């Protein structure tokens, strides 16, 4: 991920209703316009720096984010000089709320912000406001469009994850047949990368036809299930389906099983859940692309502290991606990714 600053006025005009309130900027000026990276004594004046780092995920409803939180809190515990301020929208589609949370953290003058933008365009202005306040920002999980400066991008190689999903689906389909791609929602950079990677790889398999690639399941199990039910009716000869995130995959699985076509349709998911892991064991799911959310949270906080301490931070920190199958799911590495610890 690159650091950049583009024409903010043009970008704000394009984003319309999602632009952050000008009151935030005024309030920052009233507070002195200072960033949060000054020295603060830890433990009552021993001279050690104490940092408050805000971690703002896309949402709170999925296990993935609680594992990110676990990793962030583990980093803070290891360092002993960091307070993680965890702030989250209730649902991943609430972009306005995520913008408000960034603005609140600016007003609180945290030392750094670690953000997983739930919309790649609409969060740019909020990050630019943090830039103006002197607060560094690290982006994780999902990328951000041009128009603001970031320290680093900590994430899965989502395009590669999508390619791995396509290769697994092609393998279990015997490299032929019709497949369906279930997209997530517009504006989500991480899932867009998965979708594009999947389609790029499937183009290398001439005997496989992608019969649907423009339908969105949304951010809930119920909306994804409804969409897959419609797609299965529209494409009765489909033999494969890829769902690009946990909620989509859970809904897709329900729709496939309820249709009575579970034995005929090969299914690959992205991100695990208890239901998907059970399906992997039973053969109802042929593969789950796995991220490392604990590493994502841990490395984001660690990178922020290195930056605050004046150390070099890589502009892109990859956290890896794997594919769990019924053949390898009991291996220790896969078990750690299928069942990552969560914050309690």
Image (tube, rainbow, N blue to C red):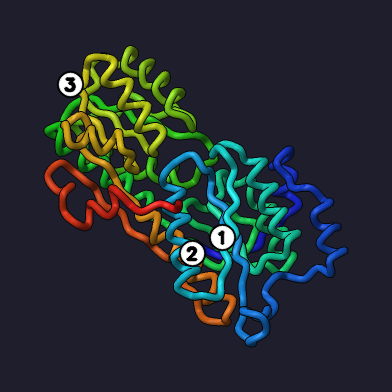
Calculate the distance from the C-alpha at mark 1 to the C-alpha at mark 3: 43 Å
Q: Secondary structure at mark 1?
A: strand
**C-alpha separation, residue under disc 2 versus residue under disc 3:** 42 Å
Residue 254 x %, y %: 32, 23
Relative vertical location of residue 241 with respect to residue 4 in this rendering, above or below: above
Horizontally, is 38 left or right of 215 in the view? right
Say which of 73 and 326 sits in front: 73
Asked if the residues shown at circle 2 and circle 1 are in contact, with their CB atoms under 8 angstroms apart, the answer is yes
- Residue ID at (46%, 60%): 297
Q: Is residue 160 visible?
A: no
Look at the numbered disc 2 and give the secondary structure of its residue: helix
Q: Where is residue 171 shown, x and y percent of the image? A: 15, 38
Seen at 55% across and 75% down, the residue is 81
The residue beneath circle 1 is 114
Q: Are marks 2 and 3 in contact (CB under 8 Å)?
A: no
The disc placed on residue 300 is: 2
Please determine whether, in this image, residue 327 is positioned above or below residue 75.
Answer: above
Dot 2 or dot 3: first in sequence order is: 3
Q: Secondary structure at mark 3?
A: loop
- Residue 264: mark in rendering: 3
Decide which of tag 1 and tag 3 comes sooner along the chain. Answer: 1
Please indicate whether residue 119 sits to the left or right of residue 235 in the image: right
Q: Residues within 10 Å of mark 3 (few under 14, many from 20)?
A: some
Of 31 and 318, the residue lying toward us: 31
In this rendering, which labeled residue sits more in front, label 2 or label 3?
Answer: 2
Q: Which mark lies nearer to you, 1 or 3?
A: 1
User: Which mark sits nearer the N-terminus, 2 or 1?
Assistant: 1
Q: Quick one: 280 or 158, which is closer to the camera?
A: 280
């Amino acid at each position: 991920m690159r650091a950049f600053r583009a024409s903010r006025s043009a970008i704000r005009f394009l984003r319309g209703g999602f632009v952050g309130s000008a009151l935030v900027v005024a309030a920052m000026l009233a507070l002195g316009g200072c960033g949060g990276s000054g020295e603060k004594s830890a433990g009552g004046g021993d001279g050690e720096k104490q940092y408050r780092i805000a971690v703002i995920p896309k949402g709170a409803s999925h296990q993935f984010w609680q594992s990110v939180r676990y990793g962030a809190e583990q980093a803070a515990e290891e360092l002993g000089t960091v307070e993680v301020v965890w702030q989250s929208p209730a649902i991943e589609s609430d972009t306005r709320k995520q913008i408000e949370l960034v603005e609140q953290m600016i007003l609180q003058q945290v030392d750094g912000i670690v953000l997983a933008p739930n919309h790649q365009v609409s969060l740019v202005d909020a990050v630019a406001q943090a830039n103006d306040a002197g607060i560094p920002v690290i982006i994780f999980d999902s990328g951000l469009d041009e128009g603001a400066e970031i320290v680093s991008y900590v994430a899965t190689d989502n395009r590669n994850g999508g390619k791995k999903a396509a290769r697994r689906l092609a393998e279990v389909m015997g490299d032929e047949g019709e497949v369906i791609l279930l997209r997530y929602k517009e504006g989500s950079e991480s899932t867009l990368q998965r979708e594009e990677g999947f389609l790029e790889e499937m183009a290398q398999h001439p005997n496989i036809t992608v019969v649907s690639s423009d339908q969105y399941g949304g951010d809930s199990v119920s909306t994804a299930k409804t969409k897959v039910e419609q797609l299965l009716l529209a494409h009765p000869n489909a033999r494969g389906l890829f769902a690009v995130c946990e909620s989509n995959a859970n809904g897709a699985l329900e729709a496939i099983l309820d249709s009575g076509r579970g034995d005929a349709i090969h299914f690959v998911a992205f991100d695990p859940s208890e239901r998907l892991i059970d399906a992997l064991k039973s053969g109802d799911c042929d593969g789950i692309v796995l991220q490392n959310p604990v590493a994502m949270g841990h490395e984001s906080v660690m990178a922020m502290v290195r930056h605050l301490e004046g150390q070099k931070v890589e502009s892109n920190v990859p956290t890896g991606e794997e594919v769990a199958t019924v053949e390898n799911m009991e291996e220790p590495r896969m078990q750690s990714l299928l069942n990552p610890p969560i914050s309690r």
